[in-house]
Amino acid sequence: MTTEEPLQQQSQTMFCMRKKMSEMIETSDTDSPLLHDQDMTTSALAAFRAKEDDIERRRSEIRDRVQAQLTRVEEEAKRLHLIHGELDSVTDPMRKELSAICKRVEIVNRDVKSLGEKEYKESVEAFNEKTTEKGQLLAKLAELMNESEKLRSTKLEELCKNI
């Protein structure tokens, strides 16, 4: 990640500084008059290491928090995708069947109108047949629409319960 690059550079810089300070302590003579300076360097090195450890601990905590948030976001995205799929399936599962019946009703209506111009007996007989067929189709259409609405409402209720 690009956010970790500055942290890695900072960590490398701190490592180099710690190494230099350790080398300075090792090369200094314990019997020299710089014993006081060595103690100060040692305490500065200890303070530096403590700060470095604190920074590393904070960085680890932040990384853990960000990872936890990313995990939560991914889980919520999956859940949202599932809900979206459920909503799409609720959009009238019998749409094709309903449109086919509507087309047939229109055709029957046209046939009924054209038959009104023909001879009276044939027209009355065909008119009655088509009217009966139209009634049956309209009843079937109403039944399918009721079933469709029931399915949609049960799916919506299930979806609301899941949310």
Image: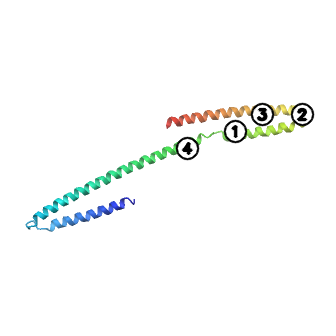
Q: Amino acid at mark 1?
A: Leu
Give the labeled residue for mark 3: 134
Q: Amino acid at mark 4?
A: Gly
Query: Do the CB atoms of the residues marked 3 and 1 lie less than 8 Å apart?
Result: no
**Front residue of 16 and 35:** 35
Residue at coordinates 49% horizontally, 43% vertically from top-left?
A: 79
Choose the circle earlier in sequence order: 3 or 4: 4
Q: Quick one: label 3, few (<14), some, or many (20+) residues within 10 Å?
A: many
Residue at coordinates 13% horizontally, 64% vertically from top-left?
A: 37
Q: Secondary structure at mark 4?
A: helix
Cα separation, mark 3 vs mark 1, equals 14 Å
Q: Amino acid at mark 2?
A: Glu
Q: Amino acid at mark 3?
A: Lys
Cα separation, mark 3 vs mark 4, equals 36 Å
Q: Secondary structure at mark 2?
A: helix
Choose the circle earlier in sequence order: 1 or 4: 4
Give the labeled residue for mark 4: 85
Choose the circle earlier in sequence order: 4 or 2: 4
Checking the image for residue 122, the label placed there is 2
The quadrant of the image that shows the N terminus is bottom left
Cα separation, mark 1 vs mark 2, equals 31 Å
Q: Position of residue 28 (x, y in %)?
A: 13, 68
